[in-house]
Amino acid sequence: MLRNVSDMDLKLLRLFSAVVKCGGFTAAQAELNVSHSNISMQISALEKRLGYRVCERGKGGFSVTEKGRIILDAALKIFEALDQFKDQAQSLSGKLMGDVYVGLADNISTLSSAHIDAAIARFYQRGHSAHLHLFVNSPAELEVAVIDKQIDVAISYFNRILPNLTYRNLYTEPVGIFCGASHALFDNDDIQPFDLEDADWIAYGFLSADLERMVRPTTSTATAYHLEAVIHAILAGTHLGFLPLHCAEPWVAQGKMRILLPEIMQQDVQHYMITSNAHPQSEAAQAFMEDLLHVHGVITP
């Protein structure tokens, strides 16, 4: 029976939490970079320490026991309390310390209205000992990461407003509809809106509602989860797709892409900085958020 919680117990509990999050041992292997047998051995060690099973595994699949769910909830509270303790202890030094986790949308390095580089430069001028971790992911994955406290702040465009997140406007991004050089519409000088609706589209789930109202395609035989993938489908000449103008610019200059009906089918998409309402931010994370707002001309509260 577990009487004292050691560092090893916390390590085992974190592993158990990761396995549950991944949905089983097999999926957790890639996430943890640990073999299936090693995960099994550590879960068994945790169960031996506790005196009961926390999950079922085998031919019937993976599932968490009732006691396992109670332990997991308690462990998550411990992890959050430890994070708060670490932040408070570091703040007493009078110097920004710790880790700051930031999520970004892909393909924004060439967007003139995005000043992420300026925010990073301003942050490192503070003379701190903090460590910045930068990730690139899809908007939906960034939302989940902020909610789950995997990252502190994310910057992207989002097609929904979730009640447990705070959204701050940062900048806008002009977006249009593009086709590749081998597409049937590329050399058409009399394109009508219905031509776009009848074409095959590359779809992705992080468009703003305003863009989706501009045109309603009848056919979509491909789905992308990052802008890089949208570019490939458009260049193939098989699909139309929405792209930020700055992403398409090099391909347009080479004659490999064309924007369609820009006078009526081009709009600005709002990018936001999002943070969680449920989790307190470290001083270092708050400082980086202030720098983001400052370089984008947003008045901080």
Image (cartoon, rainbow, N blue to C red):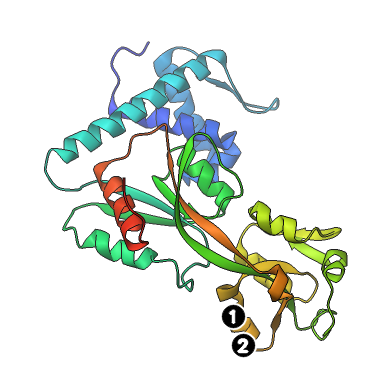
The secondary element bearing badge 2 is classed as helix
Q: Amino acid at mark 1?
A: Glu
* Image mark for residue 253: 2
| 260 in relation to 114, above or below | below
Indicate the position of residue 93 as horizontal and vertical percent values. 11, 42
- Mark-to-mark CA distance, 2 and 1: 6 Å
Would residue 27 be found to the left or right of residue 132 on screen?
right
Which quadrant is the N terminus positioned in?
top left
Position of 37 relative to 131 (above/below): above
User: Callout 2, which amino acid?
Assistant: Ala
Q: Quadrant of residue 227?
A: bottom right
Tell me if label 2 and label 1 are in contact, CB under 8 Å. yes
Assign a secondary structure to mark 1. Answer: helix
Q: Residue at x 66, y 71 (%)?
A: 231
Could you say which disc has been placed on residue 177 in the image? none
Q: Return the x and y of residue 56 as percentages of the image width and height.
A: 60, 22
Outermost residue toward the left in this view: 93
Return the residue found at the far bottom. Answer: 254
Where, quadrant-wise, is the C terminus in this rendering? top left
Q: Residue at x 84, y 64 (%)?
A: 197
In this rendering, position of residue 52 left or right of residue 294: right
Give the image location of residue 210, x and y in percent. Answer: 67, 55
The residue that mark 1 highlights is 249
Q: Is residue 220 visible?
A: yes
- Residue 291 is drawn in which quadrant? bottom left
Q: Position of residue 180 (x, y in %)?
A: 74, 79
Mark 1 is surrounded, within 10 Å at the Cα level, by few (under 14), some (14 to 19) or many (20 or more) other residues, namely: some
Q: State the residue at coordinates (43%, 66%).
A: 114
Please indicate, yes or no, whether residue 53 appears anywhere in the rendered image.
no
Neighbour tally class for label 2: few under 14, some 14-19, many 20 plus, Cα within 10 Å: few
107 on left or right of 291: right
